[in-house]
Image: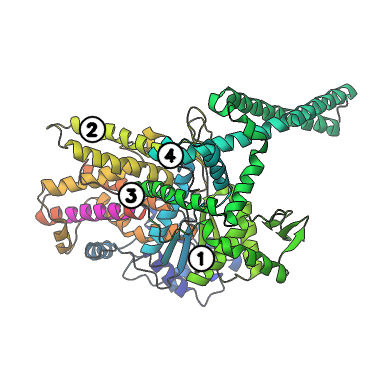
Amino acid sequence: MNILNELRRRFGRSIEELDVDHAAAVQMVQPAQDARFGDYQINAAMSLAKRWKRPPREVAAELLDRLELEPICDVPEIAGPGFINLRLRDDWIADRIVELAADPRLGVSPTSDPETYVIDYSSPNVAKPMHVGHIRSTVIGDALYRILGFLGHRTISDNHLGDWGTQFGMILYGFKHFRDDERFRTDPVAELARLYQVVNRLIDYEKKRSSLPQWETRLGDLRAALENADAEGGDDKKARKRRRRLQQEIEQLAGTIEQAQATITRVESDRQLASLLDHACQLESAVLTETAKLHEGDEENRRLWEQFMPHCKQALSRVYQRLGVRFDYEYGESFYHDALDALVQKLLDDGLAEESEGAICIFFDDFETPMIVRKRDGAFLYATTDLATIAFRMKTWQPDAILYVVDHRQSEHFSKLFAAARKIGYTDVRLVHVAFGTVLGEDGRPFKTRSGDVVGLESLLDEAVERAYQVVSANDDAKRDGAELDERERRHIAEVVGIGAIKYADLSHHRTSDYVFSYDQMLALEGNTATYLQYSYARIRSIFAKGDFDPESAAQVDPWQWEAPIERELALQLLRLPEALQDVEADYTPHQLTGYLYELANRFHKFYQQCPVLRAETDRLRRSRLLLCELVARTIRTGLQLLGIDVVERM
């Protein structure tokens, strides 16, 4: 049972005949922020008092006269200016705990109004190894897929792979001109990634080299303009603003030039890249040619693409397997290519798109710039493929919602995409950009290696697992009666703990926030970490082992009894799992679940410190406390599994 929903339902029914904003008033039933004021509160009296022009406490009294809370709550109390404090009855909580013990879903009832969700997440370019930038989309999307499914919705995960765009033109050119056959034979994915990086760096080099003279001329002009402005003087607001603007432009352009010069120097001092500079001047157009040939069905490029794809997908699959992530479908960009011509023609025929300077565009009243669906050279863009993807998903699955778990920097793209979809006629589906922030290093900048490269995801996982192994080994070696784990079990625990730590560290922050990546913090045995929760679970399992207690027998405790206030607090937290999952569903924010689990573990450790379990005063109290332990363990395991994180029996 969702207690909050039940209290809101009863309150809503009691005010149906009153002159109130019903929906807003019901939302004013909330969990109490301070246990001294009860378990829940109704905070509607103050706003209704203004509307009705009556004293708030008088309004609160009228609300209470109408409200029927038996047998859930004790007699409510009016506090302060008109807060209504609700305290759940102890015997009602005890009955719910007994019910919970026999419920494999821990009180979470499947929704009575299931919907179909298509969730688009991860979506890497298959030609390149996954990096730290993919972690957020992958773990957030996977958690939403699991949680919405657990709540009773139909969930469809679709990994929209980047398997067709310009990056393959880069690889095709690199493979034809720069490949190392031995490297490709030994590790094809690593060689393809190297070829992509070589071509990409050469293109970047040529762009910056050719632009540098223009930038330097512009910088000279700006500095001259600033000197003239200084010479002219003037202390009015307009003059100061002009000098400040010129100074800012100078600083920005000087930084751009400095970065460009550094890039040029690095490439020219790299022996391998320097030997390839003859290719650089025509490389960008050559890459576009290779891409176009692939899209047009060129026999050689298509054959190479088909040769590369299994290796690339196998490398992705290896990472997903370690992360415990799977997809129902993996329709890449190539899947939609044949539909793009017809899509653009239909947009033109329906008057939804028009030609502008040789390109085909969709214009919007709310955006200064249009969305280009075909460039003047005939090439399609991500936007075109995304529109084709929406059309396919609507026809194939008829979803109620499509969630795009993608970096916040793509917000404008998705705003235009959704506006275009509505123009086309897709008005019965919710299109949601589930945006997220950036993974930062401890210097506050996007997390990179010391050399400035983006951190590879596999190396990130390897490092986390190795550090977890050190923590697990140190803790095991320090045990009073000697180490308990053999090497194989230590390695298994390290894999579970290390990867769980990375995933939880991401999920425990609000998805729109940036967060600082720190191995030490995420592997800590205290604080809001997966390691802390996994340790809590393992500790409970050790209690069962020491007490020779079969957790399945816990459901036989009836009635459940308690003595210390912390036991009631822990029981109440157990009953609030449905509320936490409801909060996740409302805003697609998995941190609501991590926060719930962290608070549950905190209350469990307080309970464990204050209340003897195996040495409880009576057998019934012992069994009641073991029941609490069993429910906490099950809830932690279930909650972590919904986040895509495993548990271990001992640590």
**Kind of residue indicated by mark 1:** Ala
Q: Which residue is label 4 attached to?
A: 184
Camera-near label (4 vs 3) is: 4
Q: Which residue is label 2 attached to?
A: 473
Residue 251 pos. (x, y %):
71, 28
Residue at image location 75% in from the left, 28% down from the top? 213
Question: Which callout, 4 or 1, points at the residue further toward the start of the chain?
Answer: 4
Question: Which callout, 2 or 3, points at the residue further toward the start of the chain?
Answer: 2
Q: Which residue is label 1 attached to?
A: 401
Instruction: Determine contact: label 4, label 1, CB under 8 Å.
Output: no
Using the image as rendered, state which of residue 91 and residue 318 is in the foreground.
318
Camera-near label (4 vs 1) is: 4
Residue 553 left/right relative to 354: left
Q: Secondary structure at mark 1?
A: strand
Residue 87 pos. (x, y %):
35, 60
Residue 467 visible in the shown view: yes
Quarter of the rendering containing residue 48: bottom right
- Numbered tag placed on residue 491 in the rendering: none
Q: Secondary structure at mark 3?
A: loop
Distance, label 2 to label 3, CA atoms, is: 21 Å
Residue 354 pos. (x, y %):
75, 63
Q: Residue furthest front?
A: 299
Residue at image location 74% in from the left, 54% down from the top? 368
**Kind of residue indicated by mark 4:** Phe
Q: Which residue is label 3 attached to?
A: 645
